[in-house]
Image (cartoon, grey):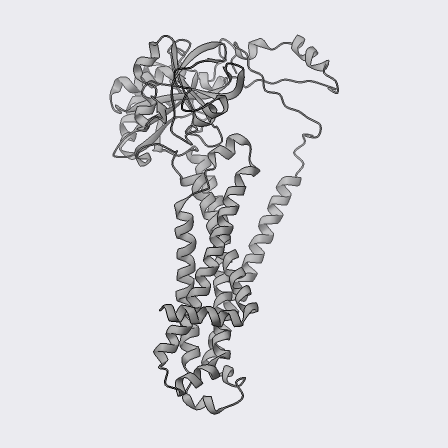
Amino acid sequence: MFEDLRFALRSLGRSKVLTTVLLVSLALGTGVNAAVCGIVYALLLQPPAGVGHPGHLVSIYTSEFSGSPYGRTSYPDYLSLLEQRVIPDLAAYDDDEMVSVRLGSSTRSARLSAVTGNFFDVLQMTAHAGRLLLPADTHRTPAAAVVSVALADSLGDAATITGAHVEIGSASYEVVGVAAPNFRGLRSGRATDVWIPMRAEGRGDRGDRRLSILARHDRGASSLQPALSEIAGRLANDHPLTNRGALNDETAARAFSAFEYSPRDPAAGSRFATIAAVVVGAVALLLVSACVNAGTLLLSRAMSRRHELAVKRALGATRSRLVRQLFAESLFVCLAGGALGLLFAIWVTQAVPSLFSPDQADLLQTSGIPTLMLLTIGVAAVAGVVFGVAPALQGSDAPESLALRADSGAISGTSGGTRTRSVLLAAQLALSTLLLVVTAMLVRSLSTALEGDFGVGSDNVAMISMQYKQRCIGHSEARNKQLMEIRGVESVGWAALPRSARAHGGRTPSRPAC
């Protein structure tokens, strides 16, 4: 076998142009395919870092007045779910708040997540340093906090920050531990850096729905749905003002829905899955086209060498020996192309996060995915086997009498080789045409979306995010005037994100909140 590989390397070195074309074609086909599959896996399928048995996690949603079944839940509803003891491992978190974190002279902006004391227990996560939050931390003094590795490193050092006292917003907390490396929360696009215990104070409004509910259940989401439907009906009877109301039926109960955990809600996840299927299908066409192109070139090369192979047969070489030699050449060039494709895929997946915002880039853990290597090398090996068999069989099927002929050009025109090449060329042409059409439609749709006129001008517009202790109550016209005094500012407007009246059963909340 080593002798065959050594001969294959010498033989391919004699046809440098053909070998280069084969390597580039296979590297692009396998590399793009592996890179796209790796990105799709990171966006849709990769579980959060450090979470134990993520397949047992279940997300529970509350239906909204607008008709969406994937809304959030209030703290009193969460307590009602706990009281029923249907799901013993039930946690809640609220990651809507941005805060400033100060340690000494260092200040960082971070997303804060208030979590129930059993949050990390439900995730079955271990700490990178120190410990994670416990139920007893809910009433602990001083208040406890857990930070991410990224925030700990930016403030100093992840190994020494445990025990330090930091200011989170306007309150002081003691850092009791650092979360698992690369763990930045449970929702895509919302990187969390600080976790503090959730307190009951200020969360008594059953219509104030801002909690995400997470459960761990060995039998999956479907087994929980009957019990959740029964609880929803009971709460609708006990609390009709907050637990009833849908867009088409104001008397309908606010339903609980259980789904297998995903970083996106089921509606968004299905849309992303459709887009991902289209993109993966397009790159799969590119991969097949590259493999067919490689097969055509390998077959042409083998047929052009039939005179050489006939001479070898006349000198005593068996057909099986020639098939093995040609097959080794095909497999070698395919594996070499796959190795180059793997390097290209690694480069692409490491470059993709730079196209996103820092928070989103942290969640795109596309580098170092083991399946990238397995997928790329596996595809290259399969391509070498599938598209190396036909050239080996066709090229070695040369009788010894052809060794007496001087015109090798006529040898390559045998009916078997011509038919096989015709089929491969037709397949390559069809795949290339289909790929061009799909790519043109995708580019045109993207161009239309980017150039569309939505009736809102975005040029010379800056958006400033402000945080007030009392939410939108803290803003005023006086603050607008202060902003207008900044050089270059022509006009100022402001908007809040109010707790929708839909969350309060269609009634206006008693106080504004954003």
Whether residue 255 is visible to the viewer of this picture, yes or no, is no
User: Residue at coordinates 48% horizontally, 28% vertically from top-left?
Assistant: 190
User: Residue at coordinates 47% horizontally, 76% vertically from top-left?
Assistant: 302
Q: From this view, report whether residue 414 is shown above or below residue 180.
A: below
Picture quarter containing residue 80?
top left
Q: From this view, report whether residue 457 is shown above or below residue 36.
A: above
Front-most of residues 117 and 102: 102
Count of marks overlaid on the render: 0
Q: From this view, report whether residue 36 is shown above or below residue 407.
A: above
User: Residue at coordinates 32% horizontally, 27% vertically from top-left?
Assistant: 126
Front-most of residues 328 and 480: 328
Front-most of residues 56 and 154: 154
Image coords of residue 266 (percent x, y): 41, 35
Whether residue 451 is visible to the viewer of this picture, yes or no, is yes
Q: Can you say which quadrant of the picture contains the N terminus?
A: bottom left
Residue 440 falls left or right of residue 392: right
User: Residue at coordinates 43% horizontally, 65% vertically from top-left?
Assistant: 332
Picture quarter containing residue 232?
top left
Residue 81 falls left or right of residue 439: left
Image coords of residue 333 (percent x, y): 46, 64
Front-most of residues 293 and 79: 293
Image coords of residue 513 (percent x, y): 51, 13
Image coords of residue 362 (percent x, y): 48, 33
Residue 511 falls left or right of residue 219: right
